[in-house]
Amino acid sequence: MPSGLVTALSKGEATIEVTTVDGSFSARCIVSVTVPPTPEELLTQEKGWQLTAGTCDPPFELGNGDLVSNLFEGFLYDCELDDIIFFYKNYTQYLNYGKNLCDWESGIGINLGNWRIREDEGVLEFQLSYFFNEDDTFAKLEGRIVILNENTLKLDIPITFDDGAKLAKRGLMVSRSTKDYVFTLTYSKVSK
């Protein structure tokens, strides 16, 4: 092979030896070919993922009128920083509570339901403890996967809030308004 170009065809190890035309010099090296992990393999880590950053665009308006773009400053409870999410290989999602348990029952965590990665591997469908439907059940979310590797999971999640949905569902006449947001959530691999 005059060019010296080597193309990997499958996973494994190969020894490559080259010799000069006059035979005076030779060299040998071992090349290892690995297969990168699939998105499912990256997500289903034994120690799970911990939420480490959250932002909102445009800034979210709290009940007192404050605008919040950093979700850890007024929107998410401080104790939820300790929550760890597991994506199990059977496509169920589980939330394991950390040191601070908020209003949850001590020491049990909760099954959030199913998750899946879309066929194009660009969208993760899942649930979170922080977002609820009109009937106070966990909302199903779709997050565009911005980063997914062995250490970081970063998602952009579009969400529309309807401030009168629950009251309207009960038959009450209310002034309703909706607003669209993009929540960017960053998780880190748990190293404990």
Image (cartoon, rainbow, N blue to C red):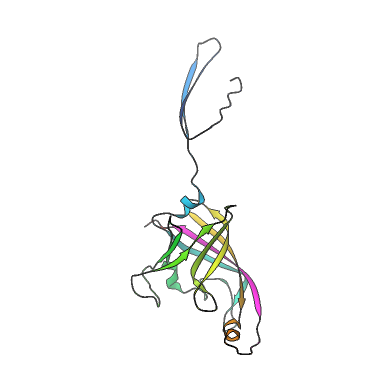
Q: Residue at x 48, y 52 (%)?
A: 40
Where residue 18 sits in the image (x, y, percent)?
51, 19
Judge from the rendering whether residue 142 lies leftward or rightward of residue 100; answer left or right: right
Image quadrant holding the N terminus, namely top right
Q: How many tags in the picture?
A: 0
Q: Quadrant of residue 107?
A: bottom left
Residue found at the very far bottom of the displayed protein: 173
Residue at the location (58% across, 84% down)?
Answer: 169
Picture residue at 56% right of the left edge, 30% below the top? 7
Q: Is residue 99 left or right of residue 148?
A: left
Camera-side residue of 150 and 137: 137
Looking at this view, is 65 or 10 the one in front?
Answer: 10
Q: Is residue 92 magenta?
A: no
- Is the magenta region chiefly helix, strand or loop? strand
**Residue that lies at the very extreme toward the left in this rendered image:** 107
Per the image, is 177 magenta?
A: yes
Left or right, residue 167 beside residue 95? right
Q: Is residue 20 above or below residue 125?
A: above
Q: Indicate the quadrant where residue 190 lies.
A: bottom left
Quarter residue 180 falls in: bottom right
Q: Position of residue 171 (x, y in %)?
A: 60, 88
Location of the C terminus by quadrant is: bottom left
Across and down, in percent, residue 5 comes to: 58, 26
Residue 177, percent from left and from top:
66, 81
- Residue drawn at (65%, 75%), measured in percent from left and top? 179
The region drawn magenta spans: 174-189
Image: 12 above or below 25: below
Q: Is residue 182 left or right of residue 94?
A: right
